[in-house]
Amino acid sequence: MARLRTLVFSPLLLLISVVINQPSYGSKHLNGRDLVEEVCRHTSSQGYCIDTMIPGPPLTAEGIASTALGWAQIRTLEAGTLISGLIKDSVSTDHPGHYHMRLQRCWDLNMKAMADLWSASSSFYSKNINAMVNYLITASRDTKKCQDLIRGRNLPGLAAKNSDIIKLSEICVVSTKFF
């Protein structure tokens, strides 16, 4: 009879240990401003994160991820529009050839980032969070490559859009730790 009780309680102990050891930052019960502050505490730009993520009751981790992802997509579209205009201007003005080539490479990277953000969105809504995180990391990495290409080129508008994309992607990734 004692052996039967051991077998019944063992799966329960296994379940409890899996729940307790689940990798996350904890604090899953937080909502609203407290959740925003906790998510933002784990990002590289806490001030930007808090200022960007305006909590509307009740804001959940999923809500933060959805908002950050949507804004990252918008910023990517805006960056693409800026790059397109800069490419057109670089052809009609007297810019060195490497300037045009850098912008073209940035355009290509922006298109990749845009595709990755749309894929991340699709993964988010189909609850494939690992795929979403991978797409976000790739989009951020490609945006950082564009940022490196334009560094020192006096393109503050594009640099600001790229910076936003990188930060919003990070906010989205961090918020998944609170799902």
Image (cartoon, helix red, strand yellow):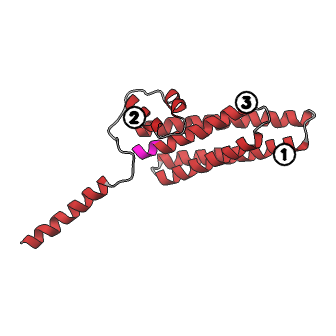
* Visible residue check, residue 78: no
Quadrant assignment for the C terminus? top left
- For image coordinates 35% across by 54% down, the residue present is 22
Residue denoted by label 2:
35
Amino acid marked by disc 3: Pro
Residue 55 left/right relative to 93 = left
Amino acid marked by disc 1: Met
Q: Secondary structure at mark 2?
A: helix
Packing grade of label 3 (10 A; few <14, some 14-19, many >=20) is few
Give the mark, 3 or 1, whose residue is nearer the N terminus: 1
Q: Secondary structure at mark 1?
A: helix
Magenta range is 175-179
In three-dimensional space, the C-alpha distance between marks 2 and 1, rounded to whole angstroms, equals: 43 Å
Q: Position of residue 49 (x, y in %)?
A: 52, 32
Give the mark, 3 or 2, whose residue is nearer the N terminus: 2
- For image coordinates 67% across by 32% down, the residue present is 160
Residue 71 left/right relative to 88 = left
Nearest the viewer among 21 and 73 is: 21
Q: Position of residue 154 (x, y in %)?
A: 78, 31
Give the mark, 2 or 1, whose residue is nearer the N terminus: 2
Residue denoted by label 1:
101
Residue 35 left/right relative to 4 = right
Q: Is residue 177 one of those drawn in magenta?
A: yes
Quadrant assignment for the N terminus? bottom left
Amino acid marked by disc 2: Leu
Residue denoted by label 3:
156
Q: Position of residue 4 (x, y in %)?
A: 11, 71
Q: Position of residue 142 (x, y in %)?
A: 67, 48
Q: Secondary structure at mark 3?
A: helix
